[in-house]
Image: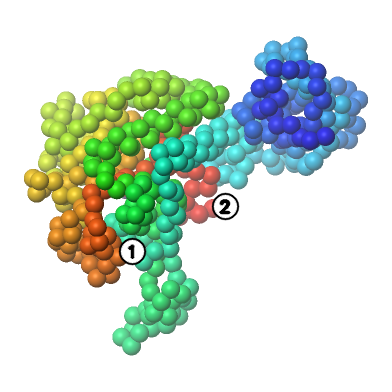
């Protein structure tokens, strides 16, 4: 007989049919009631092992962590807490589990920090099962959203010789010997002898290549891994993270905002519809975590309420200049509560972004029109000559979740800006060619997938929403 997944047994109205179920034991009660989980859903299946169906020796190994195959009948449950259970006729032990060494005994609730150290096993907890099922749904919804709108999924390179932001922070990719690399006559490392015949890095963004695609396919998006060797040990930064980057020909900054807002609402609604049980569990987890905080730091909304709110309300749209004004006239500023100074021209710090979103507007905020000096070379210069058509979306509890812009499509402006910012124009001929050969207005944005997963799951550390986080001094597993 074929294996039936626990999710489908629990969703099935029928009873009194035979099944084979396989999974990992979460707990055993009274030597008789086995809570079995196979990851297909949050809930465990209760397996009833009446005396005699398992020999004494095997019964010793029916413990938390062990894996089993159960043959039996789905029946209505007399006990509380479940509608149906499986009355086992045979239980086959698939894999033993050393009880002494298994770190996921249910006795004490393990902390998230501890579970990070055993990331290879944490999938087996309710929390991480829920997080990774929601993560999957979000990824699926991303593709569904763009597919429904006729976007082409473009795979941009992971190894690249260009740096989209014109900044450092990249991981070098090389096959040269670390101890004795070939040298040039003047003693520098000779990258001509490297695998690609030049210096290469892991990509920080697929945007520039996505722009090339958009200049023919009109609507494209990327969804792939990006790498940043930034030494920021925060709860919102990873060295390896996944980014979604749509790029759309003929879109201006307003179309770009509309697209980003529709996108975020769509993927959240998708999980609300398809992951209700997991989200409700995560909401409860968050409630418990919030209760440990002082009153004034607790969020006003529960997770479900927050997600519903985001789906049902328009994002606030303000300019950078308005944002600075709000900050300057805020009680927090007047009482000198901000660590960093506020004045026109600053890059908004996380404390400023959080004030705007959590205290002032109490909803996601799209900020546009940033000073050109704090933004990338490819952003379109506004008519005022000092701001660019950039947009950041700030989310409650997260801060920046999206960074995007209308791109500078005018060749002269772009060249001028690249020279000012010391971006090599000859090397980037391929990027400039799009402005030479039929340039059009276009816009796009980058959304950090893990920040989205953080927002939707209510988890608070980005290390807890990617299976195996890469952060400074850590590449375990
Ligand atoms: P931040 O100011 O938070 O460092 P950024 O301005 O460097 O972000 P962008 O270069 O605009 O970010 O990247 C686009 C999006 O990618 C961000 O809005 C964010 O959601 C995400 N992102 C950026 N850096 C990281 C990181 N190190 N880990 C996870 N997500 C990131
Ligand atoms: Mn950054």
Seen in the image, is 131 located left or right of residue 292?
right
Q: How is the image coloured?
A: rainbow
Q: State the residue at coordinates (23%, 42%).
A: 252
Classed neighbour count for the residue bearing mark 2: other residues with Cα under 10 Å, few (<14), some (14–19), many (≥20): few
The answer to which of marks 1 and 2 sits earlier in the sequence is 1
Q: Is residue 189 above or below residue 14?
A: below
- Mark 1 burial class by Cα count in 10 Å: few <14, some 14-19, many 20+: some
| Residue 63 can be seen, yes or no | no
Q: Where is residue 49 drawn, in percent x and y?
A: 83, 24
- Disc 1 secondary structure class: loop
The mark lying in front, picked from 1 and 2, is 1
Q: Residue at x 48, y 25 (%)?
A: 272
Using the image as rendered, state which of residue 312 and residue 152 is in the foreground.
152
Q: Residue at position x 13%, y 46% from top? A: 382
Q: Which residue is mark 1?
A: 162
Residue 477's disc number: 2
Q: How many marks?
A: 2
Q: Is residue 88 above or below residue 161?
A: above
Residue 32, percent from left and from top: 80, 23
Residue at figure coordinates x 26%, y 46% from the top left: 250
Residue 300 appears at what percent x and percent y? Answer: 35, 20
Classify 174 as above or below 14: below
Q: Nearer the viewer, residue 274 or 213?
A: 213
Q: Where does the image place residue 148, in percent across and percent down from the top left?
A: 44, 37
> In terms of secondary structure, where does tag 2 sit?
loop
Can you tell which quarter of the image residue 298 is in?
top left
Q: Quadrant of the N terminus?
A: top right
């Amino acid at each position: 007989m074929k294996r039936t997944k626990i999710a489908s047994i629990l969703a099935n109205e029928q009873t009194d049919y035979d099944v084979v179920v396989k999974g990992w034991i979460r707990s055993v009660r009274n030597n008789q009631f086995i809570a079995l989980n196979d990851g297909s859903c949050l809930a465990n299946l209760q397996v009833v092992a009446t005396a005699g169906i398992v020999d004494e020796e095997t019964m010793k190994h029916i413990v938390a962590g062990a894996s089993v195959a159960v043959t039996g009948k789905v029946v209505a449950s007399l006990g509380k807490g479940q509608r149906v259970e499986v009355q086992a006729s045979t239980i086959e032990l698939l894999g033993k589990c050393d009880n002494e060494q298994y770190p996921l005994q249910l006795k004490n609730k393990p902390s998230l920090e501890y579970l990070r150290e055993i990331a290879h096993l944490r999938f087996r907890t309710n929390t991480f099962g829920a997080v990774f099922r929601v993560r999957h749904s979000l990824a699926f919804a991303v593709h569904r959203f763009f597919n429904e709108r006729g976007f082409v999924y473009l795979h941009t390179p992971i190894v690249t010789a260009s740096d989209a932001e014109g900044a450092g922070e990249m991981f070098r990719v090389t096959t040269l010997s670390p101890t004795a690399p070939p040298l040039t006559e003047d003693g520098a490392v000779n990258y001509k002898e490297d695998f690609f015949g030049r210096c290469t890095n892991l990509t920080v963004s697929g945007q520039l290549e996505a722009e090339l695609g958009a200049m023919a396919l009109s609507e494209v998006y990327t969804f792939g891994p990006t790498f940043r060797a930034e030494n920021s040990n925060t709860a919102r930064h990873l060295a390896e993270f996944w980014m979604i980057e749509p790029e759309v020909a003929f879109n201006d900054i307003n179309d770009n905002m509309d697209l980003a807002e529709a996108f975020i609402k769509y993927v959240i609604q998708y999980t609300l519809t398809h992951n209700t049980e997991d989200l409700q569990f995560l909401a409860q987890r968050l409630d418990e975590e919030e209760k440990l905080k002082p009153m004034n730091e607790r969020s006003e909304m529960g997770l479900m309420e927050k997600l519903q709110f985001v789906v049902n309300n328009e994002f606030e749209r303000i300019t950078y200049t308005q944002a600075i004004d709000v900050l300057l006239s805020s009680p927090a500023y007047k009482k000198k509560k901000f660590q960093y100074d506020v004045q026109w021209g600053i890059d908004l710090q996380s404390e400023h972004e959080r004030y705007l979103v959590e205290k002032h507007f109490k909803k996601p905020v799209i900020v546009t029109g940033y000073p050109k000096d704090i933004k990338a070379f490819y952003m379109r210069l506004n008519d005022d000559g000092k701001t660019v058509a950039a947009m950041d979306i700030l989310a409650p509890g997260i801060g920046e979740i999206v960074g995007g812009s209308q791109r500078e499509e005018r060749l002269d402006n772009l060249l001028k800006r690249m020279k000012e910012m010391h971006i090599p124009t000859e090397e980037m001929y391929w990027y400039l060619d799009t402005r030479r050969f039929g340039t059009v207005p276009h816009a796009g944005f980058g959304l950090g997938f893990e920040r989205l997963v953080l927002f939707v799951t209510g988890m608070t550390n980005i290390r807890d929403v990617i299976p195996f986080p890469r952060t400074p001094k850590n590449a375990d597993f």
